[in-house]
Amino acid sequence: MVDHREKPSSSEIALGIYNPVVFKRMTKSWKADELIPVAEELYSDMETALGVKALHKNGILKLFSSKDERTFWEKKMHNGEAMAFLDTTKEQSEYTDVVFDELGNADVLHSGWLDTAKLLSAFRKFLRGNNLLIEKKFEYKNVNTSAELLQWNNLSAERIIFCEGSRASENPFFKNLPFVLTKGEMLTIRIPDFSPQHLISKGVYLLHEYGDVFKVGATYDWDDLTDIPTEKGKTDLVEKLKKVLKVDYEILDQAAAIRPTVKDRRPLIGLHSEDKRIGIFNGMGTKGVMIAPFFAKQFAEYIESNIPLDKEVDIKRF
Ligand SMILES: Cc1cc2nc3c(=O)[nH]c(=O)nc-3n(C[C@H](O)[C@H](O)[C@H](O)COP(=O)(O)OP(=O)(O)OC[C@H]3O[C@@H](n4cnc5c(N)ncnc54)[C@H](O)[C@@H]3O)c2cc1C
């Protein structure tokens, strides 16, 4: 594994939420029923192997923003592809002293969050301890493809799989992939004396990380592709929080990163058309936590046993 950690990655900044429901249309998120069981299984295996607690299956509590939104949920609860994930609506939540929930609320079943920063930190420690991690920038120009084995610096390899997130847009081996990158910003805040069991969603996610520390996210910006936190990002989240929180809070931190989003909003996975030793695993977009485990498994089966990749994710489509 070669990883050059200049700054926290998109994965580390992510809230780590997996949500099988697209709230805008109350439809099922793409392949959610297939993806979530594989993701939960992998993360809990990693927790056991690494000795950390990172997977939180405490689901999302959706607070309705309008009567229409609630009516729409109730309709889709009985009819539609997201039925298995939409629980019965309720009048008031158990957090009514702290949040604005007067228009009712409901649970999203099979949802939760992964403490990505914690899991990645434990995984990094494991790799270091087993001498499996090279903490250097991967320079493309140092790859030699002329021998039977690929050469990079002093290493020989049968394959190179690039998993570079948004930085893949600079990768000369995969120049023509249609990334449409998206900046995301999030806040870390302190709310005293509030320990909800749920992840709360009302136009924005409010995630209880530990103690009185919460994460709030996220924003979407397609124009500014720097990973620098902005006043605009903060204002956007603060405005959204006004509709959620009845109580005062303190902003502790703000962070930004670039999501590896793709024109058709599907992953970019596959081997190079002219050199099958070079591959890419990317395009996890806004939902890496849910998507990556399922397709990592599928990609491994494709490489090792030639079991075809799902056409929707295969880079051959471009
Ligand atoms: C604010 C925010 C909130 C988000 N919330 C969620 C959420 O709630 N749920 C969810 O599922 N997703 C969320 N996401 C999206 C999620 O972060 C991505 O889907 C996912 O993390 C992408 O993972 P990745 O491994 O492809 O890329 P990255 O996490 O960017 O990892 C790429 C890695 O490659 C390394 N690298 C790149 N180039 C080189 C090089 N040349 N040499 C050496 N190393 C290199 C980097 O150091 C990094 O470690 C959020 C994103 C943001 C920004």
Image (cartoon, rainbow, N blue to C red):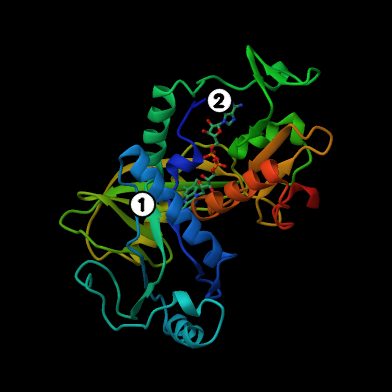
Residue depicted at 60% across the width and 35% down the height:
164
Q: Which residue in the rendered view is the most extreme toward the front? A: 305
Q: Using the rendered image of the protein, determine whether residue 284 is visible from the camera's viewpoint.
A: no
Q: Quadrant of the N terminus?
A: top right
Q: Position of 135 compared to 280: left or right?
A: left
Q: Is residue 166 above or below residue 29?
A: above
The foreground one among 301 and 196 is 301
Residue depicted at 65% across the width and 51% down the height:
267
The foreground one among 70 and 302 is 302
The foreground one among 88 and 24 is 88
The amino acid beneath tag 2 is Val
Q: Is residue 132 above or below residue 209?
A: above
* Residue at the disc numbered 1: 55
Name which of mark 1 and mark 2 comes first in the sequence: 2
Bin the neighbour count of mark 2 within 10 Å (Cα to Cα): few under 14, some 14-19, many 20 and up.
few
Residue 286 image point, x, y percent:
55, 53
Bin the neighbour count of mark 1 within 10 Å (Cα to Cα): few under 14, some 14-19, many 20 and up.
many
Residue 308 image point, x, y percent:
73, 52
Residue 191 image point, x, y percent:
22, 54
Residue depicted at 65% across the width and 47% down the height:
301
Q: Which mark is residue 2?
A: 2
Q: Is mark 2 within 8 Å of ligand 1?
A: yes
Figure quadrant of residue 205: bottom left
Q: Using the rendered image of the protein, determine whether residue 19 is visible from the camera's viewpoint.
A: yes
The amino acid beneath tag 1 is Leu
- SS at mark 1? strand
Q: Which residue in the rendered view is the most extreme toward the right? A: 274
Q: Which mark is residue 288?
A: none
- SS at mark 2? loop
Residue 128 image point, x, y percent:
42, 23
Q: Position of 317 compared to 250: left or right?
A: right
